[in-house]
Image: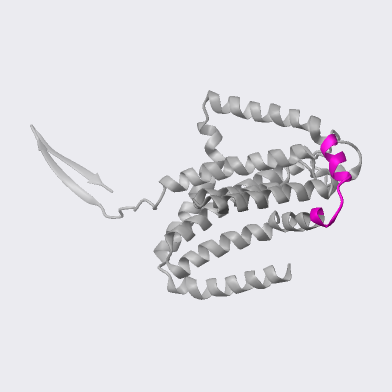
């Protein structure tokens, strides 16, 4: 934790010096693309067709079906012991924390600015748009649904919507949303298969971590991953087509067009 904190401070110091040396138009363009990706992701349901709503219904039905496995999976991890699970739990716990999201996003974007590497910058923008949209969405759902965590020992079907008790913020898994969001974007941006496997393995370690620590049900994890998948796929697809900010032409031009009986005066902005 302390090492990550020092790293973030170093990144911020570098960013402060680098930002002055960069073309402000490039940075403003990146901010525009990031904001556009976030807005597009959140408004995507407005563009859904019937098949998309059927897919959503299937996801909700599938999540409800997965809840049947909540208690058996919990019982399995309650009986799991050993240093292997403890190490996996620590790796997955840290990988799914918000500081991992900031670290990955900041490192790739700022590194891209320093090295003038478009691929790295676009990766950072994609990570930021994915993690912000999925993070805000899962945070709202946690409060709105108010599902009890396994550690409360009240069962998988106890709910207290908008409760301030963190014991009732189980659905969906925020850790899984962060972990799978990072892994999805990295796997999409890197073509080397072993690296893809590595990142998805890290996401799997987060799933194991939350189950082993009695923090989430398996259905919480499944839905948290689904949120990250939707936000990641949508944001990356938008960013891939929106490669630059449309330039606004602030000049005004007047055109005079003759026609029988007079002249036509038009203004173009």
Residue depicted at x 52% and y 30%: 48
Viewer-closest of 230 and 245: 230
User: Quick check: 76 above or below 101?
Assistant: above
Whether residue 24 sits left or right of residue 211 in the image: it is left
Viewer-closest of 218 and 125: 218
| Residue 36, position as x, y percentages in the image | 48, 48
Q: Which residues are magenta?
A: 71-85
User: Quick check: 15 above or below 232?
Assistant: below
112 part of magenta stretch: no
| Residue 239, position as x, y percentages in the image | 46, 48
In the picture, the quarter occupied by the N terminus is bottom right
Count of numbered circles on the image: 0
Whether residue 139 sits left or right of residue 238 in the image: it is right
Whether residue 78 sits left or right of residue 205 in the image: it is right
Q: Quadrant of residue 145?
A: top right
Whether residue 247 sits left or right of residue 100 in the image: it is left
Viewer-closest of 261 and 114: 114
Residue depicted at x 60% and y 47%: 133
Q: Main secondary structure of the magenta part?
A: helix
Residue depicted at x 84% and y 38%: 160
Residue depicted at x 56% and y 52%: 194
Residue situated furthest left in the rendering? 260
| Residue 254, position as x, y percentages in the image | 20, 48
Q: Is residue 102 visible?
A: yes
Q: Is residue 129 visible?
A: no
């Amino acid at each position: 934790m302390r090492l990550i904190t020092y790293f973030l401070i170093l990144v911020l110091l570098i960013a402060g010096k680098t930002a002055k040396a960069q073309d402000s138009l490039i940075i403003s363009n990146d901010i525009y693309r990031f904001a556009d990706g976030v807005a597009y992701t959140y408004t995507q349901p407005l563009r859904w067709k019937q098949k998309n709503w059927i897919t959503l219904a299937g996801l909700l039905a599938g999540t409800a079906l997965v809840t049947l496995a909540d208690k058996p999976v919990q019982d399995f991890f309650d009986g799991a012991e050993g240093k292997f699970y403890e190490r996996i739990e620590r790796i997955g716990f840290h990988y799914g924390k918000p500081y991992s999201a900031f670290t990955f996003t900041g490192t790739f974007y700022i590194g891209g600015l320093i090295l003038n590497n478009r691929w790295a910058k676009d990766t950072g923008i994609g990570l930021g748009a994915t993690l912000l949209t999925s993070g805000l969405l899962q945070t709202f759902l946690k409060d709105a649904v108010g599902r009890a965590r396994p550690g409360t020992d009240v069962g998988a079907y106890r709910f207290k919507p908008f409760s301030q008790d963190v014991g009732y913020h189980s659905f969906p898994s925020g850790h899984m949303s962060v972990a799978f969001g990072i892994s999805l974007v990295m796997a999409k941006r890197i073509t080397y298969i072993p690296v893809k496997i590595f990142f998805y393995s890290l996401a799997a370690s987060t799933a194991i971590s939350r189950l082993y620590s009695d923090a989430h049900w398996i259905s919480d994890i499944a839905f948290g991953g689904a949120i990250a998948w939707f936000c990641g796929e949508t944001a990356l697809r938008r960013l891939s087509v929106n490669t630059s900010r449309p330039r606004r032409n602030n000049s005004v031009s007047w055109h005079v067009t003759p026609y029988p009986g007079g002249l036509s005066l038009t203004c173009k902005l």
